[in-house]
Amino acid sequence: MLQDVYYSLPIALCSFFGITAMLLGALVQKNRSNIVMPYSTIGLVTVFTFAALFWGRNGTAFNGMITIGMYPYFFDMLFAAAGILVMIAARPYLQRMNWEFDEFYVLVLFAVSGMMLMAHANHLLITFIGIEIMSISFYVLAAYMRNESLSVESGLKYFLLGAFSTGFLLYGMALIYGATGGKMEYPAIRAAVSYGSQMPLLLLAGTGLIIVGLCFKVAAFPFHVWAPDVYQGAPTVVTAFMSTGGKAAAFAAFIQLGAVLIPNGGPDSVKITHLLAIISAASMLYGNIAACAQQNVKRLLAYSSIAQAGYMMIGIVAGTGRGTSGLMFYLAAYLFTQIGAFIVAAALENEYGKQLEFSDYAGLAKRHPLLAGVMSLFMFSLVGLPPFAVFFGKYYLFTAAIEAGYTWLALVGVLASVISAYFYLGLIVAMYFRTHETGEIQPAAPGMSGVTIALAVAGVILLGLIPAAVLRITGGGM
């Protein structure tokens, strides 16, 4: 029992810091956030450190319900990094809005603990519990600024559609439980799915429902309808967290469940893989085409996130070790790039007191040369230009698709990347080659957000400079 707790210490520590941060906020009466915010950040740094220390360990815990290894510990570090970056940047943003309360940092800690459960899950119930802990935290965070109608609308839409998708997920798990003779552990389900044979109708239906539920969580087409409104209405720092950490957690569960249910070598598994390939292609094309028509930058990044989910699903479609490690690398690259882009948007919102439209970025290079420069770097990375991090993520995923026989999907990915250049590079053109109507030159002062932006820039550049080393780390796959 003690050994089980020891090896699952990153999850236990995250939950411990979440509970104690909540108690700390209740006990301290004055300047609570001055204590809760650094305490929560230290908690996530501790979680990151222990995940790195446990890197080489493998096995299971708690009667096989929790898995231990390079794969889940990699995601632990990814989730902790996302939480740290968002907490640091959230403080100036929330202080300007007069909405800095210790509950925000507690919710981030609980969301991270749910994500970690999803990555470590070796049992359907653990996956479901992790998804619910993460989702409930996100519902509250999306509606965090309850005096703003957009934020309340965002939280309500996310809650209603999220509950609907959870129904699909839970019903799919119930069907799999029935089809496999009462099995809920991943190894037992994998053993119950006979290799090369046709899948029973009940198992096929359960697999389909789980795919629907997970596609909602990653905002893949056509289960994306919640993303643009939720991303626009939620506080920008929350959007940065949801679109990166939440997406990574859903793909962590996707990888695990895909390895259990899909690759049994039978005709039905081939059909499922083809279906996922179609969803991937549709997400890439729809997300990028729809983003071209957006004027609000947060909505632009939301539609971009739909397209990014399509790129990531290529790793699931490939179903190989290269596809899995490529997906893990892509998630790391995307996390730093997307968080950086949203935090730049949040810093500008802090100054101008409103959500910025595309036209508001005109002439930004004169008013904020530093912010314009780092935003350009994030846009270059998102479009997939070398030597930035996302380029190598796309390269690894496209080559994995070709090796798996999905050359057409890789070509769709290249076409979608070309389309995305219109709005990613268009934002850079606006910042450097257009003039803002006010013509004012103002000093750049991102404050504490600058720490997050600097760390995000370092992550994008570092992953771009040593992609092979990172790929070797993720090459252990599952």
Image (spheres, rainbow, N blue to C red):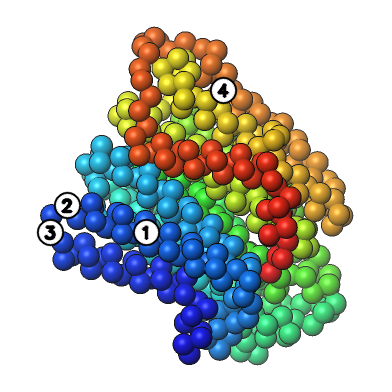
Q: Are marks 4 and 2 in contact (CB under 8 Å)?
A: no
Kind of element beneath mark 1: helix
Can residue 131 be seen at all in this image of the molecule? no
Residue 255 percent location from the top left of the image: 66, 65
Question: What residue is pinned by disc 1?
Answer: 42
Q: Are marks 2 and 3 in contact (CB under 8 Å)?
A: no
Disc 1 packing (10 Å; few <14; some 14–19; many ≥20): some
Q: CA distance from mark 2 to mark 3?
A: 7 Å
N-terminal label among 4 and 2? 2
Kind of element beneath mark 2: loop
N-terminal label among 3 and 1? 3
3 vs 1, front mark: 1
Residue type (three-letter) at the residue carrying disc 1:
Ile
Question: What residue is pinned by disc 4?
Answer: 428
361 to the left or right of 121: left
Q: Is residue 189 above or below residue 268?
A: below
62 to the left or right of 94: right
Question: What residue is pinned by disc 3?
Answer: 29
